[in-house]
Amino acid sequence: MRRFTVREQEAGQRSARYLEKVLPAAGRGFLYRMFRKKNITLNGRKMTGTEILEPGDEIRVFFAEDTLEKFMGGSKDVASAPAPSGKAAACVRVPAGGGGARRQPWPARGEGKPGLPVPDILYEDAHVLIVNKPQGMLTQKASEGDISLNEVILNYLKETGSYDPAGSAAFRPAAVNRLDRNTSGIVLAGKSIRGLQVLSELLRGRELEKYYLAVVRGTLMRPFRLDGWLKKDDAENRVHIRREYFAGAGRILTGVKPLGAGRGMTLAEIELITGKTHQIRAHLASIGHPVGGDAKYGDPAFNRKLRDEFGVRFQLLHAARLVMPENLPEPLQALSGREFGAPAPEPLARVIRALERVQ
């Protein structure tokens, strides 16, 4: 027999989902049979698999040790130790989170795990991490050799003591929203199951106000909203946009507010009302105002001008501002109505300064 105590980070998920992570090789049908036979219990009672776990809940698994090891798939994520009794089966209690452990200060920038930078943190609490992603970094891995923002975040949380893989078999912190490799700016990550769930629900419900800074070709004079339809071509890794519906397309809405113009370009604040792949870049390009530095949807001549004058190598698109809705549920209630901003990277900042000089 083994027992697992739910940590604060792991709370908020269904009990069956928790066990699918702890025992990945067991299979859902097998787990539900074990619930019915009371070979797996929750707080000493029969389980249904639908219970929402809370910190400190105890799940006991009455399997032989070799069976348990097989279903755990050789996982090293859950600590184990022999039971103090004389029984052959092991019994381990994973400590619940939220103890009095003191966090160690994160080392100075650049002193983390070799090859992994320290994230640019905009906000952090027990459930949420908000970071400023640099240009040139993937949010999630595309291939085994990639170093993504997810790895950077996990490394930071492990080094600061906020995440212990050995005690969190049923949860792994992760980024909730994605930015293109060459788009910089605000990325949200969940440090706990409940934090991840609330952030995901806000994104799905379009309750977060997300604003980007973009430098586009041409002069824009007044705010407007773009309405259209977008379809992704996976083979070409690009999207196609039309004003009217076409087969397989999803509706997109993009708000545009000019902030300043000059030298044949405009700095604009873009509100991402929906959230489709390449939406901002392709939508602006579709009306003749492509984002500067964009190799996929942009204007080569405009891109060369920006490269020669300002050293632009990536698209001038930055997730600069995020506004949380009011009346957030726990445990994110303290973030209700708050606004977060991320400073623009170079060379976008150089282009902005140049535009300010011609106003």
Image (cartoon, helix red, strand yellow):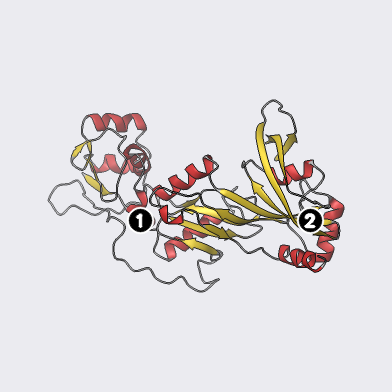
227 and 78: which is toward the camera: 227
> How far is mark 1 from mark 2, CA to CA?
50 Å
Residue at screen point 36% across, 32% down: 28
Percent position of residue 207, x then y: 53, 44
On screen, residue 115 above or below 9: below
| Mark earlier in primary sequence (1, 2) | 1
| Residue at the farthest top position | 247
Characterize the local packing of mark 2: few (<14), some (14-19) or many (20 or more) Cα atoms within 10 angstroms. many
| Residue at the farthest bottom position | 108
Residue at screen point 44% across, 46% down: 198
Answer whether residue 36 is visible to the viewer in this image: yes
Residue type, mark 1 in image = Ala
On screen, residue 66 above or below 99: above
Q: Decide if residue 39 is on the left or right side of residue 285.
A: left
249 and 116: which is toward the camera: 249
Percent position of residue 231, x then y: 69, 33
Q: Nearer the viewer, mark 1 or mark 2?
A: 2
In this figure, which residue is indicated by the disc labeled 1?
166
Percent position of residue 291, x then y: 76, 51
Residue type, mark 2 in image = Thr
Element type at mark 1? helix
Percent position of residue 43, x then y: 21, 43
Q: Decide if residue 124 is on the left or right side of residue 140.
A: left
Residue at screen point 66% across, 63% down: 344
259 and 176: which is toward the camera: 259
Give the quadrant of the N terminus.
top left
Answer whether residue 182 is visible to the viewer in this image: no
Residue at screen point 80% across, 51% down: 220
In this figure, which residue is indicated by the disc labeled 2?
266
Characterize the local packing of mark 1: few (<14), some (14-19) or many (20 or more) Cα atoms within 10 angstroms. few
Element type at mark 2? strand
